[in-house]
Amino acid sequence: MSLVPKYHIPARKENGKRNVVIVGGGFGGYSAAKLLDKDYNVILVERNKLFYNCIAAVRVPLEPRLVETTFLSYDNLLKNGYVLIANVKEISPTCVLLDDDQSISFDYLIVATGTNNTSPFKAPHFTESFGVDQVPLYFQSICDAIRDSSSVLIVGGGSVGVEFAGEIREKYKDKRITLLHGGNRLVNNKMNEKFYAQVDRLVQSHNINVILNERLSTPQDIKDKLKDGVCHTYTVEKKIYTTDQGTQIEADLVFYCIGNSVNTSILATHFSNSLDENGRVIVNLSLQIQGHSNIFAIGDITNIPEFKEAYNAIYHSRVVCKNLPLLDKCNDFQPSPTLYQHVINPKPMIGISFGKTDGCVQFQNGWVFGAFLTKLLKSNNLLINRVAKDLNSPKPYFHLNNN
Ligand SMILES: Cc1cc2nc3c(=O)[nH]c(=O)nc-3n(C[C@H](O)[C@H](O)[C@H](O)COP(=O)(O)OP(=O)(O)OC[C@H]3O[C@@H](n4cnc5c(N)ncnc54)[C@H](O)[C@@H]3O)c2cc1C
């Protein structure tokens, strides 16, 4: 990875290859960068120095040592291009503007800025006040809080909430764990009955207290932190929480697993017409932002009606990478060639881990499996090894001592 001087980086370098700027080095962004590295001048701009494998984020607070294998450097990702650690503050149709006012022009732009989640479920936006080096202590503090609590309330019974309940239960057999969910189905309401039967089995056999169809309003500070990707610290303090239906829940530690906040404010100035009412980017199935043949959006930020999952972000990156060579052949992208299109799979696929040995999975053909297969596919390792391999096995950034 090379250092970049502070100046305007022009498009098209001497080697005749076109510049591709990718904003966001999450699942979609790093996958696109890898695929394009050989044939383009790739600049991947990512605000965080380390990639966080959030698929494992439900386990890291219980096993803080996992920061060694889930926070990964980008050092080995690219052979030819480079990863620039910088926050993008604005995107225009011709260039990307960084926080320090450096700008980068591009032939192609891929926006893959993804979503924030409440910490510790996605990496926060690291800042001077919460730097990357505070990560091990941060996760240790959450681990200590869970250890010191006697009753944990998890607000939100989507996949993250359910998986997190499973991780806590695996380590602490006697804690009271309550999963409060506003919907009538845990995880989501798009799966089949066999899947829900498995989810019910998971929570019942592991003694999770489930409350459905009731809500707790989210405190404003949690909402703000979610939006800005700011870290939340956890304290153990006995309190009574009253739901909108009047149910009282006593807990001394509460986690909000309330979903994502989409990172598209950098598009608000020049692409406001391309954002839908939820702030998602309106793209066609070739993943182009409307009206811009050379600007793409991929992953969680897109308005494509499908599960916002890492595997979809990776599929998107493959579609875009197949389309760039087709666009290369046109003069100023006119006439527009026939491009590859992302195929939306109307049938959902989801795997829910529940600790290291249990869980359930529903495949796109509707088949549902329980603990045995889910353990092999996901629960045992939460894709930690696979994602590290995808980033070309970088050396661990954190080295925790053995005590
Ligand atoms: C706890 C948890 C568990 C999950 N488990 C699974 C699972 O098992 N399977 C699965 O398929 N999916 C899972 N997901 C969903 C998956 O993580 C997302 O779908 C995926 O991360 C989306 O990838 P992305 O590339 O669109 O965005 P992200 O992964 O969110 O990456 C966006 C990147 O952009 C960077 N960025 C944002 N703004 C800027 C800026 N202004 N300048 C520079 N960089 C910026 C961010 O730092 C981030 O690195 C899980 C999510 C969570 C939270």
Image (tube, rainbow, N blue to C red):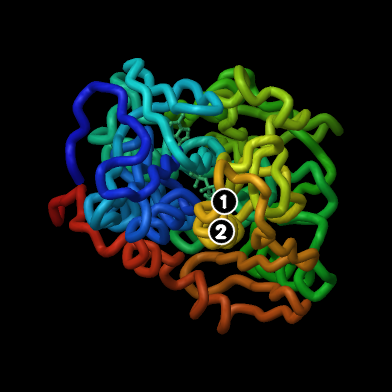
Say left or right for 216 vs 183.
left
Work out whether 303 lies above or below 124. below
Q: Residues within 10 Å of mark 1 (few under 14, many from 20)?
A: few
Which mark identifies residue 330?
1
Q: Is residue 170 above or below residue 124?
A: below
Q: Is residue 166 visible?
A: no
Q: Residue 326's mark?
A: 2
Residue at image position (50%, 53%) is 328
| Secondary structure type for disc 2 | helix
The answer to whether 348 is drawn above or below residue 101 in the figure is below
Q: Secondary structure at mark 1?
A: loop
Q: Is residue 182 left or right of residue 151?
A: right
Residue 376, image x, y percentages: 49, 80
Viewed as shown, does residue 219 lie left or right of 328?
right
Q: Amino acid type of disc 2?
A: Leu
- Seen at 61% across and 21% down, the residue is 270
Q: For the residues marked 2 and 1, what is the alpha-carbon distance in whole angstroms?
A: 7 Å
Q: Nearer the viewer, residue 161 or 153?
A: 161
